[in-house]
């Protein structure tokens, strides 16, 4: 048997951390420092587990960039002392947090695995136990050379390990709640954990640097038939928005009314970043496919390929922290920085 791996578990909140009071049946967060009392199976893993927790556990709908900064800094402070990290997180915004961390943790070459559950860990049919136990196993898993099997931010949920910035929450009710519509899963857990690509290359060299993110003027504009000119112009013209993420039809199409195209043209002429991401779950934006897309390209819209909206938002926030040059942001957006899109 190998030396036990050391895994740091960071509890932020969410459904997974709840237990049911036997008398009242009410759910309340449990004390994660007592985790092995709640899940005695943890003692059977060949892993030393330590835990830290947010002072006040949060529902993940309340997560904001400041919480990502806390998480990223906690990982940085403990980076040398652990083989891997688990972030216990509510499912609602888990894909956003995973995407954000994937960019913020520059140089990462150890596993940072986010997991949670659809049912609280303290109820009988919980999916939380399996999710947590296997996530810990993945976080501590090493290859024959003693290197981590996974060197990136990922989500483990219901037998699948998914690249964090490719993940999307697809179900409110099924245990199988996350998918990776445009990129193969990193691993599948059955009788064994089968890593799909043993060559999952870490994006970094282990020299960890945290880029903190802040609230910025990014706005998401879903395109739908019958949008009003006033509203579209309001969003595209507002000085509060430096970047607009258009969620478009199919392979990146939008209405071709002159007022709509003019509104975009005015925004890009004012040095705003306008990104084109498809509303479709699968496939990618291809702006050279239709006349429609070609026009968008010619007026400075950036194609988002198959990036998820979660990852696109995080990438824009990250790039804004790195540079004020719109040209650089546009150029960098088109590059896959952490495997977040197919180029
Ligand atoms: N609302 C919860 C959260 O995201 C749901 C969950 O944990 O699954 O924190």
Image: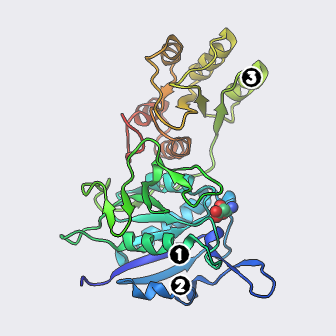
Q: Residue at x 51, y 17 (%)?
A: 293
Sequence-earlier tag: 3 or 1: 1
| On-image quarter of the C terminus | top left
Q: Secondary structure at mark 1?
A: helix
Q: Which residue is mark 1?
A: 129
* Numbered marks: total: 3
Q: Residue 42, image x and y in percent?
A: 46, 84
Sequence-earlier tag: 1 or 2: 2
Q: Residue 122, image x and y in percent?
A: 64, 79
Q: Residue at x 35, y 74 (%)?
A: 140
The foreground one among 113 and 329 is: 113
Which corner quadrant of the image does residue 151 belong to?
bottom left
Marks 1 and 2 close (CB-CB < 8 Å): yes
Q: Residues within 10 Å of mark 1 (few under 14, many from 20)?
A: many
Label disc, if present, on residue 39 of the rendered structure: 2
Q: Which residue is mark 3?
A: 227
Q: Secondary structure at mark 3?
A: loop
Would residue 8 appear left or right of 191 to someone viewing this image? right
Sequence-earlier tag: 2 or 3: 2
Q: Residue 43, image x and y in percent?
A: 43, 88
């Amino acid at each position: 048997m190998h030396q036990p791996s050391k895994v740091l578990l960071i509890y932020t909140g969410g459904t997974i951390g709840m237990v049911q009071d036997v008398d009242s049946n009410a759910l309340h967060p449990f004390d994660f420092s007592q985790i092995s009392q709640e899940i005695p199976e943890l003692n059977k893993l060949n892993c030393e587990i330590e835990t830290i927790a947010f002072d006040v556990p949060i529902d993940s709908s309340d997560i904001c960039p400041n919480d990502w900064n806390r998480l990223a800094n906690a990982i940085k402070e403990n980076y040398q002392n652990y083989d891997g990290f688990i972030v216990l997180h509510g499912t609602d915004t888990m894909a956003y947090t995973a995407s954000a961390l994937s960019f913020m943790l520059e140089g990462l070459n150890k596993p940072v695995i986010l997991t949670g559950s659809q049912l609280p860990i303290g109820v009988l049919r919980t999916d939380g136990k399996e999710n947590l136990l296997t996530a810990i196993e993945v976080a501590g898993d090493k290859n024959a050379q003693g290197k981590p099997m996974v060197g990136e931010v990922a989500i483990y949920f219901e037998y699948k390990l998914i690249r964090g910035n490719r993940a999307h929450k697809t179900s409110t009710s099924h245990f199988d709640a996350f998918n990776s519509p445009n990129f193969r899963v990193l691993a599948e857990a059955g009788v064994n954990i089968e890593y799909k690509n043993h060559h999952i290359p870490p994006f970094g060299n282990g020299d960890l640097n945290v880029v903190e993110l802040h609230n910025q003027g990014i706005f998401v504009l879903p395109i739908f038939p019958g949008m009003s000119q006033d509203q579209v112009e309001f969003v595209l013209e507002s000085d509060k928005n430096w970047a607009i993420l258009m969620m478009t039809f199919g392979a990146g199409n939008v209405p071709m009314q002159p007022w709509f195209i003019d509104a975009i043209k005015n925004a890009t002429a004012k040095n705003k970043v306008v990104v084109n991401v498809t509303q479709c779950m699968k496939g990618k934006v291809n702006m050279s496919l239709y006349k429609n897309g070609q026009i968008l390209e010619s007026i400075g819209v950036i194609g988002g390929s198959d990036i998820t909206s979660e990852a696109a938002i995080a990438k824009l926030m990250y790039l804004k922290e790195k540079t004020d040059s719109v040209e650089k942001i546009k150029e960098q957006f088109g590059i896959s920085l952490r495997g977040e899109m197919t180029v």
